[in-house]
Image (cartoon, grey):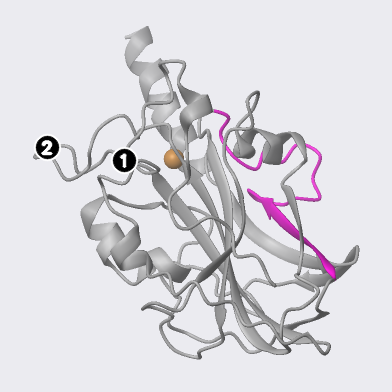
Amino acid sequence: MLLTIATLVAVLAHQVSAHARLFRVSVNGESQGDGANKYIRTPENAEQNQPIFGMEGFASPAITCNTRGGTAAPSFVKAAAGDKLTFQWGHDNPDDPNDYPLASDHKGSVLTYIAPYTSGQPTGPIWSKLAEDGFDGTEWATTKLINNRGKVELALPKSLAPGKYLIRQELLSMHKADYDCSEPGRSDRGAESYPHCVQIEVSGNGNQKPNQNFDFNEGYTCKDKGIFFNIYVGQNDKYVPPGPRPWKAE
Ligand SMILES: [Cu+2]
């Protein structure tokens, strides 16, 4: 009976407190205000923020910008090439000191991609990776995110061409990634992706356009070594996140 209650509590805890979502973006330290459904294509049931995972998830448009990625948000973050962006993740309220952004067992990467803006579903070979943080020899990127109270920092490339873009930041949790999710009966395994997309309008006089042409529906597969990887056997130094190595502006 005790075990049953403990199990139930664990299940409920997973449902209500496990998952982070993106609340807002700051530009050079200045908050751009609550971004949910304003400049962020916030998913349905954002409080639950269920992962995108498995063969079906990776084949669906939701792997790009989550379940409402095909619906344009009304506004844009305004930033200049070279500006420092801070992405604020949280659970219920990132300004509450007791808010716990992400369950600590959700160890994994924080990956950031960029694509030219489209008002519709941002699928196809349009994405480039801006930054990746997996296992740094000591800690997983999601552990650093928790310790940093949900904040992730990123500088826009100085030479990035002006224009409208989507920036997709993803927490990629590896806590159930120890089996190939394409194997029969293993459809709930593999990495779990929590992608959020921000609409951004970049100014400046850069001339570099990201050109990696990465397609999530092709590149995120159950057999990718960044998706199917056992984090519990002391091999984490060998981990390489999925997708290309980050784009380097010339
Ligand atoms: Cu979870």
| Front residue (pair 99, 111) | 111
Identified at 48% across, 54% down, the residue is 194
Residue 177, position as x, y percentages in the image: 35, 35
Kindly identify the amino acid type of the residue bearing the numbered disc 1: Gly
Identified at 40% across, 43% down, the residue is 226
Kindly identify the amino acid type of the residue bearing the numbered disc 2: Gly
Relative side of 244 to 249, left or right: left
Instruction: Say whether residue 124 is magenta.
Output: no
Residue 176, position as x, y percentages in the image: 35, 33
The image quarter containing residue 187 is top left
Label 2 vs 1, first from the N-terminus: 2
Relative side of 60 to 95, left or right: left
| Image quarter of the N terminus | top left
| Image quarter of the C terminus | bottom right
Q: Which residue is mark 2?
A: 185
Residue 116's place in the image compared with 196, above or below, is: below
The image quarter containing residue 116 is bottom right
Q: Which residue is mark 1?
A: 190
